[in-house]
Amino acid sequence: MMSDLEEKYGHIGVLMGGCSSEREISLKSGKAVYAALKEAGCRVSAVDIISTQEANVVQLLKDAKLDVAFIALHGQFGEDGGIQAILEKIKFYFWYKSE
């Protein structure tokens, strides 16, 4: 049976990692977000972003079959609008938590 949150949001991907010097803190933040969403009853996957190349990111998102992206990327590409620009370009729904 599908939970209310899963029905509302679908498959949530927590985008984490990245290629910046803040990769490790992004992984830590992403894992915490993943755990909280999972505990709340969401269908969630951790998505380790290992490239800043648009085609690679788009393919990773397609392969993961996500409905929603939660951005937990820190540093360059996560906080400078890089990932958001790609998500907007492909009309992907996303959440962004800034610090």
Image (cartoon, rainbow, N blue to C red):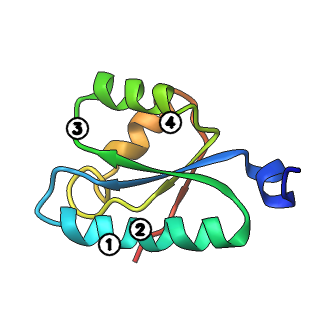
The residue under label 1 is which amino acid type? Answer: Lys
Looking at the rendered image, the disc whose residue lies closer to the viewer, 2 or 4, is 2
User: How far apart are labels 4 and 3 at the CA level?
Assistant: 15 Å
Q: Quadrant of residue 17?
A: bottom left
Q: CA distance from mark 3 to mark 2?
A: 20 Å
Front residue of 84/57: it is 57
Q: Which residue is mark 3?
A: 52
- Of residues 74 and 66, the one drawn nearer to the viewer in this rendering: 66
C-alpha gap between disc 2 and disc 4: 24 Å
The label on residue 88 is 4
Residue 82, percent from left and from top: 31, 44
User: Quadrant location of residue 41?
Assistant: bottom right
Residue type for callout 4? Glu
User: According to the image, label 2 marks what residue?
Assistant: 31
Contact check, label 1 and label 2, Cβ < 8 Å = yes
| Residue type for callout 2 | Lys
Residue at mark 1 to residue at mark 3: CA–CA distance: 19 Å
Q: Is 36 placed above or below 44 here?
A: below
Badge 4 or badge 1: first in the primary sequence: 1
